[in-house]
Image (cartoon, rainbow, N blue to C red):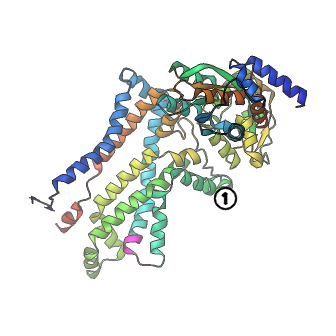
Amino acid sequence: MNRLGRSAAALFICAALTVSLASCAAETNTPDTSISGPTGEITVFAAASLNGPFTELAADFEAQHPGTEIKLSFAGSSDLVTQIIAGAPADVFASADERNMTKLADADLVAGTPIDFATNTLQIVVPPANPAEVSSLADLTKPELKVVICAPQVPCGAATKTIEEAARLVLTPVSEESSVTDVLGKVRSGEADAGLVYVTDVLAAGDQVKGIEFPESSAAVNSYPIATVGTSSNQKLADAFIASVTGPEGQKMLSAAGFGTPRS
Amino acid sequence: MFRRSGSGYTAVPRWLYVFAAVGALFVILPLLGMVAKVNWSEFIPLITSEASLAALGLSLRTSAASTALCIILGVPLALVLARGNFRGQRLLRAFVLLPLVLPPVVGGIALLYTFGRQGLLGSSLEMAGIQIAFSTVAVVLAQTFVALPFLVVSLEGALRTAGGRYEAVAATLGARPTTVLRRVTLPMVLPGLASGAVLSFARSLGEFGATLTFAGSLQGVTRTLPLEIYLQRETDADAAVALSLVLVAVAVIVVALSYRSPRLPHLARATR
């Protein structure tokens, strides 16, 4: 993205945010004189798919804000929500879907309004050599193919189901896994001929697998919301971290990891 | 402070009961915590849903098959380890017991790279028309892998405490080794074998990590009760708790019905 485009994107994001402009300004590296910078430490609970970009982002944030420490905890979104509701000390929650953020909001544990900061779509994943010569979603319906998908109970499986319905086809998987990692594992080891996972998972797996885009994936675009947890004892730092996620730098890292821009 | 009962010295210092009570609570309290969470009004519909019944049925069938396989593979292993005398015996024992201490997911990975399509034996199996991955057979293999040490340990212990005197007598009376095994050794350690088999069954019933890694998860084919619980937990905590209680109940019934305390009743019986 060129410089002009990037600043335009930053402007757009700032305008779309419900957080204060002050924290946005802080993210564009202008010294913040109106309030003293945030200090202390927070714990960020983030969906497993955010592992790469959030680890990078937290390190950058700590470097830019001396005296702060961002602790990260990655797991499935529903595990994280269950933990927070059970009293786990989280300050920020970044979910891979809206359902789990709603669960947290229903438990009265969201401070303010959750902000969508990224999107993710599904991709067909095959072993690097693509032995079954998969090239389209329709190919996955071939009976001789061993296809592995996520179970409908988890976000990637719900997205798979939406796509099946939109594309009016029925997949007969040999396994419905409970996490993206398990789908990837089966494809990577060559046990399965193809699977459906998120674009970001394919990118994170590197050259151990190959991703194939398919047009029907637009039927299921997953939004990632982020929010400060109501019980946080350092909401100022939590808000500042969220601002950096939604700010231009965070968006750049997320897009490098394969995430799409948030829907307005 | 000394008390005697039929089977010998049983005096236990009183203070030990306090610690034993803490130990017992440590195991029982979490179970009570779970029972307290059960949504009783929905309990029956939750555990009789199609998915739940399919998972329970599959769990019972695969665990039974795994127990049978454990007996077939484990009895010779235990006999060789307890009675045999050969180089590498200790090393063999260490390897056989390894699944006890390995995280099951490691077992699953190991099985995947052995019996999987791309695995050590996978391509030969595939040429023979056998496909193990994603089948119920894979579930049985995973369960057997983690449950086998329980049978071997139980049986080897029983064999060692029973000693070899009766077998020696049988041999001097002219019985061939196979006859000694069939008529003397196996009847003598039958209780030990039974408790080992029960432990294997219970372990198979609870198997999760190796199954998930190696066999996959599909209703009626590979999704056993623990996998169903893990999946239900994503969306329906009530269903997960209800099914957990079913699994606990089945395990308690199985173990209580057939597992005897290892007080060596077989010795007394064998001398009769």
Is residue B206 inside the magenta stretch?
no
Q: Is residue B116 left or right of residue A64?
A: left
- The residue at which mark 1 appears reads as B124
Q: Is residue A198 left or right of residue A232?
A: right
**As rendered, which of B162 and A110 lies closer to the eye?**
A110
Q: Is residue B113 visible?
A: yes
A165 vs B108: above or below? above
Element marked by disc 1: helix
Disc 1: CA contacts within 10 A as few (<14), some (14-19) or many (>=20): some
Q: Main secondary structure of the magenta part?
A: helix
A104 vs B199: above or below? above
Residue extent of the magenta highlight? B80-85
- Identify the amino acid type marked 1: Ser
**As rendered, which of A68 and B95 lies closer to the eye?**
A68
Q: What count of labels does the image hold?
A: 1
Q: What residue appears at the point 54 percent right and 30 percent down from the top-left corner?
A: B234
Q: Is residue A148 visible?
A: no
Rendered-image quadrant of the C terminus of chain B: bottom left
Rendered-image quadrant of the N terminus of chain B: bottom left
Task: Measuring from the top left, give residue B31's x and y in whole percent.
Answer: 35, 37
B147 vs B25: above or below? below
Task: Measuring from the top left, give residue A120's x and y in whole percent.
Answer: 72, 29
Task: Measuring from the top left, give residue A216's x and y in whole percent.
Answer: 77, 26
Task: Measuring from the top left, give residue A112's x and y in whole percent.
Answer: 60, 18
- Kindly identify which chain the residue marked by label 1 belongs to: B
Q: What residue appears at the point 20 percent right and 50 percent down from the top-left corner?
A: B17
